[in-house]
Image: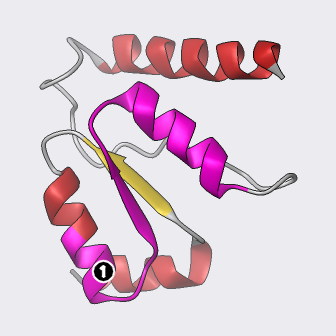
Amino acid sequence: EPDIIQLKTYVNHIVCFGHEAQYIAEMCRKHGIPVTQSETLQEAVNQAITVSCPGTCVLLSPGGASFDAFSSYQERGDAFKTYVTNIMQDN
């Protein structure tokens, strides 16, 4: 839990999804860190775009293996790149 307190210094908002999302969201709320909980990675990416401002950084920082949604970290990374590329092309 102490590591999550340090996040307040570095992040503006956390968007979490997957197996650990509920736990992460509860810890964020407990420590006053803005958080949005998503059902899928694609929804998380869309929500991250919504809560971000032009010129800010959106970082995929997995806090878990995501085996509940993806077979490997490569598959998860490829999906993230696809979702972001599609958003960039639509804008």
Taking the image as shown, residue 8 lies to the left or right of residue 27, namely right
Quarter assignment of residue 86: top right
Residue 37 sits inside the magenta stretch: yes
Vertical position of residue 28 compared to residue 78: above or below = below
Taking the image as shown, residue 47 lies to the left or right of residue 36, namely right
Residue 41 sits inside the magenta stretch: yes
- The residue under the point 64% across, 23% down is 84
Vertical position of residue 18 compared to residue 73: above or below = below
Q: Residue 69 appears at what percent x and percent y?
A: 20, 21
- The residue under the point 39% across, 58% down is 36
* Residue assigned mark 1: 29
Vertical position of residue 23 compared to residue 31: above or below = above
Is residue 89 in view from this perspective?
Answer: yes
Q: Residue 61 appears at what percent x and percent y?
A: 45, 46
Q: Residues within 10 Å of mark 1 (few under 14, many from 20)?
A: few
Quarter assignment of residue 43: top left
Q: Residue 16 appears at what percent x and percent y?
A: 34, 50
Amino acid type at image mark 1: Arg
Taking the image as shown, residue 73 lies to the left or right of residue 49, namely left
Taking the image as shown, residue 27 lies to the left or right of residue 80, namely left
The magenta segment: 26-52
Secondary structure at numbered mark 1? helix
